[in-house]
Image (tube, helix red, strand yellow):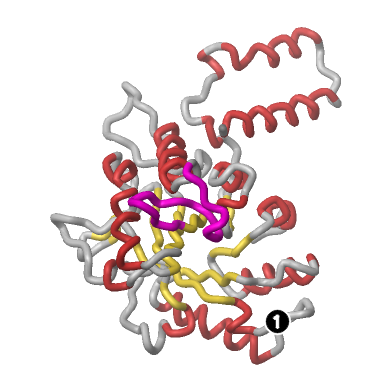
Amino acid sequence: MFSALLTAALAATTCAQADISLSQPLQNILSHAQQGPLYTYPTDLTQSIVPKPFHSHNDYWRPIPFYSALSVGALSVEADVWLYNGTLHIGHEQGALTNERTFDDLYIQPILSVVRAQNPNSSFLTAPTRNGVYDTSGGQTLYLFVDVKTDGPTTFPYVIKALQPLRSAGYLTTYNGTAVTPGPVTVIGTGNTPLNQVQGVGNATHPRDYFFDGPIPTLGTTFSNITADVSPIASTDFVVQFGNVRNETFNATQLALLESQVATAHAKRIMVRYWDQPGWPVTTRNAIWRILWNAGVDLLNVDDLQAAADYWQGDTF
């Protein structure tokens, strides 16, 4: 699937080259360069894609789930899972579920395929590699948010089981009871994910390889015992916290709340994300992105990935 995206990108490059006057010999070299091993780069699947602090909200709505987000450099993707007859299905609501669109087929296997491509076997290796999905930043993890829609205590064990292909390959971020070991993929349970199936789990013999999406507003009160090894990221509803923002600014009260929540989370080394941000008008949406980023928000919740990528072009994060 992703090869089609790469083909489109190469086509765009070819069109750009058409505007440049090149000698016929140089054109021949360029047109045949990728036909031999000399110009074949082993980990070129995500070549030139710059990772960006975007969360692909409701990622399963994309033209090609996971791959569309990957093509623009999103650091995080979100999959809504529903448990039926022992299988995790993907969709925003029950009426959108199908037998074919499963968690394994849309996320686990594609992610596994890409990570494997970024960690090829080589006689030059002195030890196995654990590169992430982005060739330009091999140490960057991909956050896979699993939004549990059906009963949490019943469904989450199936989520844990579904991670086995990534687990067996050694590609998951883990917690051994004392420390977190980063991996190419970090799984975050959200929605109906039960905290008690995450917190307190994990030791040297049986490391935990999944985490919990903490609640931003109560990290300093009700959930003050949540730490970064349980919740590396915390989230909350933007509208519930700040109301319906109908212009392009925050008032002093809103800004103070935002800064306080970010500070509390960061003091715990927990990243933050706000969802349910305004998507329209576009100028308001973009202004909110900038306000959140300036305040230290780590992942921008994005519905229009291409618009977000284009908006930041030429603008320094």
Secondary element at tag 1: loop
In the picture, the quarter occupied by the N terminus is top right
Residue 118 in view: yes
Say left or right for 159 vs 237. left
Q: Is residue 192 magenta?
A: no
Is residue 306 positioned above or below 126 on the image?
below
| Residue at horizontal 39 percent and vertical 63 percent from the top | 189
Is residue 175 positioned above or below 101 on the image?
below
Image location of residue 166, percent across then percent down: 34, 44
Say left or right for 182 vs 35. left
Amino acid marked by disc 1: Asn
The quarter of the picture where residue 270 lies is bottom left
Q: Nearer the viewer, residue 81 or 8?
A: 81
In the picture, the quarter occupied by the C terminus is bottom right
| Residue at horizontal 43 percent and vertical 66 percent from the top | 190
According to the picture, the residue beneath numbered tag 1 turns out to be 244
Question: Which residues fall within the magenta stretch?
Answer: 81-99
